[in-house]
Image (tube, rainbow, N blue to C red):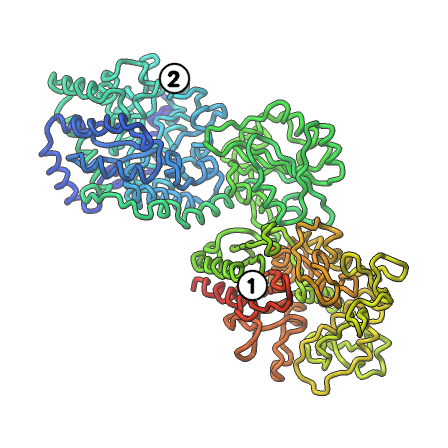
């Protein structure tokens, strides 16, 4: 005999592998205080009547949302039949908790409460947390995370009074057509299934919740559902020992509490034709209990499933299952009849006292291990909150991040680089929503959603794009939801891929790819496994390089994509999005910002605000509240853009100047005489770039350049300077129906050159240097500041919501209005810059004029924190940023860096006083602020239109709202 072809070879081999932890393996139901446990079991068992002992063998099912008749039936089974436990199915947590308490009060012996909670209580209950399905977890390469899932599921179970979770599924899903396992399996490789299942078991058992591996001896390679019929497993005995039984033997080494036996026809293990495995003494006792030496609980799968229920009459099935070696009879069709059959067999000597004692005592040992010797009723206070805690959400974020799997990536298309050269369309396929995916994609750059009823029309629409992101979205309601592509979807995908560069994203099980005859024309394919909001968000973040793809296929998706396929992608240092706790922040403390924001709205400090906080490259707080105006007609959205006012200085002008310094075209000692020949010989010729940008150059604070346009006697606009229509020489539009003379704009540098300097050199905040720097930049480049910022920074950053002249780019309803200007322009400024000097310059100023949303501002500030890098592009060197982020005149009580504002040197200043001295940022007159802290890796953005309807309203400033929010941010750092 060839020993290696014998099932006993595998049995001996695995016994050797898993023998080290023999105590937990051979006695998985033994508690740490095993002597006290034994005494408790003995005391309970010795007091039981025969009727009570037999009753312990049964676990009956109940729906907490079921009818009153169904609940009354269970009460009777507990009171009269003395059943040993209940299994809860559909319903809600509060209803289940109340029923649990009621049932436990009725029962003389504490009930073993169980559930199917494979991916959490949400498998059965509403208002509870759903973790990713096993197929998703199977893609993860870090088993520690799956152990943590086991811990969290166990804690939720205990909180609800559940002692046994019929999980994990350890079926090896080698058949894509399997109708009942599929997503419930960790995959098609036994090693992966064993590793992930063992981790899950460790987590649950660590929390003293009983685990249960199912469906023995293996339900993974069937095309039938045992709920409806008796499936056949037509493999050899050797194959079953080598593959299907592998995970069970691995789990026994982890203290596995129980095994659930499936209803399967396995000819190689049971000679009788079409004989359910759950009733087979050879399979249950011969293989599981004797050969594998499993001493935990052995439980039948539900006895009302057609795979076994059609085999014989109720009662007879239960008796056969018990005689086969099962300890617990799950969901009997008729408990009373079944008990009668078992009692009759006992009285006739067909069932011995020793056999009954064996199972009943195991059940009692399990109850003690689960804590039922010290039973406490379920407290329903805060139960919804406890079952949907932050730890679960935090873990799910991590799980989905680690599961994302890129299985094709020609020319490293993922992550997308060169945003300035890439025009992206999103095309939705499938029966479920892809809104979260599209919204997340749109955070990184402009992405257009393109759809059409006709394929040719769609292809024509896509002609103007050079990258198409396709999302195939199927229902996430259950792991059994449909996943296959229909013929029309396949045909459309082929054509789109034939004519376009395509990234295909699969938001369902990987088997969806089996429908495609070829994937040759797809440049990249990502599998996200599920269509949950988190899966969609993380998939988008992988595409843009905010996070890396790390997963590997747990199943094969055709010859081209065998099991284990998965390419690790690069992190391009773009902003990711997640939870505060993932970066060491306390979300509960950050919630205090909500109250301050609401105060701003309620007290009319501003009609609306955007607040964003990022740490360690991840956005972890966003609040978009209020309305565009006090008329409350249009709520503030994350994509709406605000007038940034003086934030323009550090987000537009300064990076361009830094770029020139880096290129050695100028330096901090370059003076105005060198930059502007007209300044030579003036009192300003020797003023250096360093002095100007440190606000230490003796410049006046500002000059009212617009004043020339007003009649000094009437205060009205002078028609010599302002026209209501565009006219030759009057092309500078400053508001609706207002055009100023071009030569006013052209004379600004001359006015500054002739202006008086302050007598004393001291700190004096001034806008004037930024007028000069705008003129300088536009002169040396020969183009507008608007074009320069887009070309050098914003397009490559994906800052597509950042612009001068927003009405040229966005619909008016996307732009937040500012002041109702009653002094000069006599209208509500909506889409036009508030700053009068920037308005004179046509809306493009070095000191003001920029519009953006908080998300885009954060990108630019994060670029600074990244040492000048973002999206895989090196915009600036760290050395350059450090040079500008330095206070050169602190000894002269000038707190400013070079362009950047810095923390106060004394008590008063622009920050909360709690930031590091390496931090930097700027504030704006319209009610804006942004601040970055390299030490704590924090980016903070606050945008508002506090000057609506009047700039005289300074409540936001008086209350110090912006710095109070900053203080909350720093209080939320977990020390």
Marking on residue 910: none
Residue that badge 2 annotates: 229
Q: Which callout, 1 or 2, points at the residue further toward the start of the chain?
A: 2
At 51% from the left and 36% from the top, the residue drawn is 530
Location of residue 884 in the rendering, given as x and y in whole percent from the top left corner: 66, 71
Splitting the image into 4 quarters, where does residue 88 fall? top left
> Compared to 677, does 506 lie above or below?
above
**Element carrying mark 1:** loop
Q: Quadrant of the C terminus?
A: bottom left
Answer few, some or many: residues within 10 Å of disc 1's Cα (few below 14, many 20 plus, some between 14 and 19).
many
Q: Along the horizontal axis of the image, is 638 left or right of 324?
A: right
Q: Along the horizontal axis of the image, is 943 left or right of 392?
A: right
At 10% from the left and 38% from the top, the residue drawn is 43
* Residue 585 shows in the view: no
**Element carrying mark 2:** loop
Q: Which residue lies furthest to the right in this view?
A: 728
Choose mark 1 or mark 2, whichever is in front: 1
């Amino acid at each position: 005999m060839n020993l290696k072809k014998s099932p006993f070879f595998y049995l001996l081999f695995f016994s050797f592998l898993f023998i080290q932890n023999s105590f937990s393996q051979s006695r998985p139901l033994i508690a740490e205080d095993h002597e006290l446990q034994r005494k408790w079991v003995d005391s309970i068992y010795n007091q039981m009547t025969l009727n009570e002992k037999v009753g312990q063998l049964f676990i009956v099912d109940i729906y907490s949302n079921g009818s009153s008749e169904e609940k009354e039936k269970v009460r009777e089974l507990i009171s009269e039949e003395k059943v040993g436990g209940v299994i809860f199915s559909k319903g809600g947590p509060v209803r289940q908790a109340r029923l649990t308490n009621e049932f436990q009060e009725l029962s003389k012996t504490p009930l073993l409460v169980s559930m199917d909670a494979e991916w959490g209580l949400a498998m059965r209950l509403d208002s509870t947390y759903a973790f990713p399905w096993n197929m998703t977890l199977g893609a993860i390469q870090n088993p520690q995370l799956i152990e943590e899932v086991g811990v969290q599921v166990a804690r939720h179970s205990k909180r609800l009074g559940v002692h046994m979770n019929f999980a994990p599924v350890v079926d090896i899903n080698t058949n894509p057509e399997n109708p009942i396992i599929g997503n419930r399996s960790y995959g098609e490789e036994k090693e992966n299934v064993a590793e992930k299942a063992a981790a899950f078991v460790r987590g649950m058992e660590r929390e003293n919740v009983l685990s249960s591996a199912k469906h023995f001896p293996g339900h993974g390679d069937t095309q039938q559902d045992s709920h409806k019929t008796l499936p056949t497993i037509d493999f050899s005995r050797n194959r079953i020992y080598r593959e299907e039984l592998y995970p069970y033997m691995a789990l026994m080494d982890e203290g596995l509490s129980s095994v659930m036996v499936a209803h399967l026809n396995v000819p190689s293990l049971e000679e009788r034709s079409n004989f359910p495995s759950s009733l087979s003494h050879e399979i249950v006792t011969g293989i599981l209990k004797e050969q594998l030496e499993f001493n935990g609980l052995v439980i039948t799968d539900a006895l009302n499933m057609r795979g076994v229920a059609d085999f014989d009459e109720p009662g007879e099935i239960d008796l056969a299952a018990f005689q086969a070696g099962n300890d617990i009879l799950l969901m009997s069709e008729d408990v009373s009849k079944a008990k009668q059959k078992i009692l009759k067999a006992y009285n006739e000597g067909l069932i011995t006292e020793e056999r009954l004692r064996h199972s009943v005592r195991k059940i009692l040992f399990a109850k003690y291990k689960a804590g039922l010797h010290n039973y406490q009723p379920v407290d329903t206070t805060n139960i919804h909150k406890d079952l949907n805690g932050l730890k679960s959400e935090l873990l799910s974020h991590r799980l989905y991040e680690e599961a994302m799997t890129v299985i094709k990536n020609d020319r490293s298309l993922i992550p997308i680089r060169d945003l300035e050269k890439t025009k992206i369309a999103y095309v939705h396929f499938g029966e479920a929503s892809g809104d979260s995916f599209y919204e997340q994609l749109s955070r990184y750059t402009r992405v257009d959603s393109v759809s059409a009823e006709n394929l040719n029309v769609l292809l024509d629409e896509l002609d103007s794009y050079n990258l198409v992101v396709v999302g195939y979205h199927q229902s996430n309601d259950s792991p059994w939801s449909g996943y296959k592509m229909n013929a029309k979807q396949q045909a459309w995908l082929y054509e789109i891929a034939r004519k376009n560069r395509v990234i295909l994203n699969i938001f369902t099980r990987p088997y969806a790819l089996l429908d495609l005859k070829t994937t040759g024309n797809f440049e990249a394919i990502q599998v996200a496994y599920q269509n949950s909001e988190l899966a969609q968000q993380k998939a988008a973040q992988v595409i843009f390089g905010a996070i890396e793809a790390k997963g590997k296929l747990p199943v094969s998706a055709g010859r081209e994509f065998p099991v284990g396929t998965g390419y690790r992608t690069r992190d391009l240092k773009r902003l990711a999005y997640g939870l505060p706790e993932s970066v060491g922040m306390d979300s509960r403390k950050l919630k205090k910002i909500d109250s301050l924001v609401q105060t701003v709205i309620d007290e009319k400090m501003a009609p609306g605000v955007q607040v964003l906080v990022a740490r360690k490259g991840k956005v972890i707080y966003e609040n978009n509240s209020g309305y565009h105006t006090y008329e409350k007609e249009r709520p503030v959205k994350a994509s709406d853009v605000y007038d940034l006012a003086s934030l323009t200085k550090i987000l537009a002008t300064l990076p361009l100047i830094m770029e020139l310094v880096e290129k050695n075209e100028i330096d901090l000692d370059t003076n105005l005489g060198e930059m502007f020949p007209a300044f030579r010989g003036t009192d300003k010729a020797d003023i250096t770039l360093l002095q100007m940008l440190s606000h230490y150059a003796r410049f006046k604070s500002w000059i009212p350049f617009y004043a020339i346009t007003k009649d000094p006697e009437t205060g009205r606009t002078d028609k010599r300077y302002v026209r209501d229509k565009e006219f030759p020489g009057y092309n500078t539009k400053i508001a609706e129906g207002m055009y100023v003379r071009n030569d006013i704009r052209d004379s600004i540098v001359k006015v500054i050159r002739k202006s008086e300097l302050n007598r004393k050199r001291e700190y004096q905040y001034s806008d004037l240097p930024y007028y000069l720097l705008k003129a300088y930049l536009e002169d040396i480049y020969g183009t507008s500041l608007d074009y320069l910022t887009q070309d050098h920074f914003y397009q490559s950053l994906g800052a597509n919501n950042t612009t001068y002249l927003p009405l040229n780019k966005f619909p008016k309803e996307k732009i937040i209005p500012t002041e109702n200007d009653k002094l000069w322009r006599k209208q509500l400024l909506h889409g036009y810059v508030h700053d009068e000097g920037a308005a004179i310059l046509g809306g493009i100023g070095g000191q003001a004029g920029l519009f953006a949303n908080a998300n885009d501002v954060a990108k630019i500030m994060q670029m600074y924190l990244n040492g000048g890098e973002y999206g895989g592009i090196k915009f600036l060197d760290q050395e350059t940023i450090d040079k500008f982020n330095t206070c050169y005149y602190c000894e002269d009580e000038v707190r400013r860096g070079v362009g950047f504002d810095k923390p106060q040197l004394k008590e008063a200043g622009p920050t909360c006083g709690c930031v590091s001295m390496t931090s930097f940022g700027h504030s704006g007159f319209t009610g804006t602020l942004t601040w970055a802290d390299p030490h704590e890796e924090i980016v903070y953005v606050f945008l508002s239109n506090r000057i609506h309807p009047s700039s005289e309203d300074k409540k936001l400033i008086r209350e110090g709202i912006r710095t109070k929010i900053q203080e909350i941010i720093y209080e939320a750092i977990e020390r």
